[in-house]
Image (spheres, grey):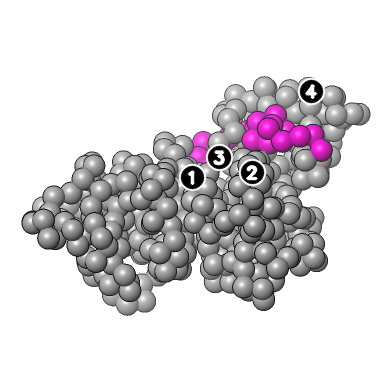
Amino acid sequence: MSRAPGGRAGIPRVALPAGVHRDTLAVREGLPRTPWGENSEALFLTSSFVHPDAATAAARFAGDEEAFVYSRFGNPTVAMMERRLAALEGTEACIGTASGMAAVLLLLLGLLRAGDHVVCSRSVFGSTIRLFQDFARFGVETTFVSQTDVGQWRAAMKPATKLLFAETPSNPLTEVCDIAALAGIAHAQGALLAVDNCFCTPALQRPRELGADLVVHSGTKYLDGQGRVVAGAVCASEALVAEVFVPVMRSAGMALSPFNAWVVLKGLETLSIRMQAQSARALELARWLQQQPQVERVYHPGLPSHPQHALAMAQQGGVGGPVLSFVVRGDDAAAARRHAFAVIDATRICSITANLGDTKTTITHPASTSHGRLTEAQRQAAGIGQGMVRVAVGLEHVDDLKADLARGLATIGA
C-alpha cells in the first residue's frame, strides 16, 4: 500500500481487545471484514484500485494519503498477512515478498551500498551465501564467520560494517547462534542485525525480543505449512519498512501475490499447533536415530548432545524445532554419499525434496541439493559432509517415520 509519512494510518485495523495472546493474533489480526461480513479473510485478486477523484489519486501515489494503489506495492490480502506476521514476530511492520530469497534481496537492496561491509554466518542457506557473494560485484564486501563463535563475529567487524546476518537454527546442522550477543555487537557499532527465523518461526522464537532489528522469513516453509506456495517477508520497524523497503519494492517489484499471501495467512492460523506437534515428533525421531549403529551423529537442538542445546532451549521456548540432520557412517566421502543416498532412496513415506516446512516429512541430501552450488571447501567449512541427511519432520506417526528410515539404514550395516 502507499504508506503516508509519519506513520499515519489510513487503513483501518481489526478491533481486538488489548493484550490478546499471540495464538489469538494468529487467527484474528489483519484488516476489518468487508461489508459482506465474510468470516474467512477475503482474497483480493486485483492489480489496481480505483480512486474517487484525480486529486485523491495524486495524494495516494505521492504517499500523502495511505491507501491501496497498485498490487505491486500494496494489496489488502497481502496487508492482512503482513499485519498478522508482524504481530506474531512483535515488530511494528512487515513487508511481503515473492519468495524467501526475494526477502533477502530486498533487505540487501534497501540497506546496503558500495563500500559497505556485512558479517554473515557461513552456515546460512546456500543460496543466501551465493547472493551475498554476488553483491561483491556491486562493492559490498561480506565476511563469513562461524555461526556459533561470538568472538569471530566481533573480530570481523569493520568501520564499514552495516549489517550482521544469521540464520538460527542453521540449515542443515541446526547450529544456534546467540541472538542477544550478536545484537550487542551490531548495535555497539551502529549496525543492524537480521535473523532468518525460517526454522523456528515466531511460534518458537522471536528474534526481535532478543535484540534483532530485522526478521527474515521464507513463507514457503512453515508459515504456509503445506508446501503450496512460494512467499517471503521481512519484519522490521515501521520506519524501515515504509522509508527503506517499500520504495525498493515499488521500483523492483518482487511483490508477493495476493493468492500466495492468502494461503500463508491461513497457514498462520495453525502455525503454533503444527510447530509444537512437528517438533515433538522430530525430537523423538532424533533420539531414535542416536541409537542406530549406522548413524555417526545426529543434529537436533532438543538433544542434550547438541553443542548449543542450552542456548537453543532458552531462545526457542524449550523446543528444539521440527528439523534434524544425521550423518551415516562411511569409510570415505564416496562411501558416505552412497550410504546417504541408500537411506533416502529406501524411504516410502518421506518425500525426497529439498523443501521443508510441510506437514509431509521431507528428506534430502544437503551436499547435493540445498548446498550443491557451494564449493566442496565451502561445504566443509559449514560442516556439511557427503554422509549428511536432513529430515524435516511432518505430522505422520513417528513410528512410521522410524520404519521408513530403518529400511535404508539396514542396507548399510553396523
Disc ID at residue 137: 2
Name the image quarter holding the C terminus. Answer: top right
First in sequence: mark 2 or mark 4?
Answer: 2
* Horizontal side of residue 373 vs 150, given as left or right: left
First in sequence: mark 3 or mark 2?
Answer: 2
Q: Quadrant of residue 31?
A: bottom left
Under tag 1, what secondary structure? Answer: helix
Q: CA distance from mark 4 to mark 3?
A: 23 Å
Count neighbours of disc 2 (C-alpha within 10 A) and say few if under 14, some if 14 to 19, many if 20 or more.
few
Residue under numbered circle 4: 338
The residue shown at (80%, 65%) is 155
Residue toward you, 371 or 20: 371
Q: Count the labels in the image.
A: 4
Residue under numbered circle 3: 356
Percent across and percent down for residue 268 are 40, 53
Identity of the amino acid at label 2?
Answer: Arg
